[in-house]
Image: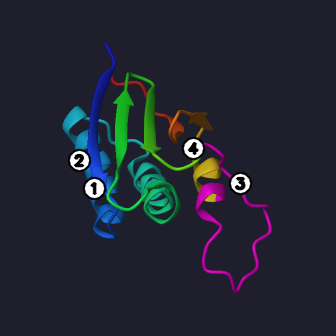
Amino acid sequence: MPLSRQRRFSRDDRSVGAAPAFAVETLVEWGITARQDDIRLCVSELATNAVLHGVAPGREFCLRVTADDELVRVEVRDSGCGQLEMPSAVVDAGEEGGRGLLLAAALSDDFGVTTHVPGKTVWLVFKVAPAF
């Protein structure tokens, strides 16, 4: 039976640290130790994008973590437009942003966007070792 937990976060810089902490705390509680660093980094990137680009003032974004014996899925849903622009693989060294989605796509085993009215969900899947 899949496990699932979600939490809402405000459009606030503190959420960028709170969201990955929530994800890792959830995994630890469930006894999932594999891929925690990858998941923490990717959730931080998705939370940053939600705060900077996806959440209107006064709104929140939602982080959902689901897991079974082989997969962990993280989803960040926000109220921003459903269009997600994946940057090119080449980003100017002087630019401060633009690498987060590339990094998340590279570290995860699957990646996608589901559009809603309003908003979107950016999701990532990570393969984890089966629990014995």
Using the numbered discs, state the Cα–Cα distance from disc 1 to disc 2 in whole angstroms.
6 Å
If you read the primary sequence from the N terminus, does the residue marked by circle 3 or circle 2 appear first?
A: 2
The quadrant of the rendering that contains the N terminus is top left
The residue carrying mark 3 is 86
52 relative position to 69: left or right: right
Using the numbered discs, state the Cα–Cα distance from disc 4 to disc 3 in whole angstroms.
15 Å
Task: Find out whether residue 87 is within the magenta segment.
Answer: yes
From the viewer's side, name the closer residue of 59 and 32: 59
Task: Find out whether residue 48 is within the magenta segment.
Answer: no
What amino acid is labelled 2 in the image? Glu
What amino acid is labelled 4 in the image? Ser
The residue at the far top in this view is 1
Using the numbered discs, state the Cα–Cα distance from disc 1 to disc 3 in whole angstroms.
25 Å
The answer to whether mark 4 and mark 3 are in CB contact below 8 A is no
The answer to whether mark 1 and mark 2 are in CB contact below 8 A is yes
Residue 21's disc is 1
If you read the primary sequence from the N terminus, does the residue marked by circle 1 or circle 3 appear first?
A: 1
Using the numbered discs, state the Cα–Cα distance from disc 3 to disc 2 in whole angstroms.
29 Å
Residue 25's disc is 2
Residue range in magenta is 82-102
In front: label 4 or label 3: 3
The residue at the far bottom in this view is 94
The residue carrying mark 4 is 108
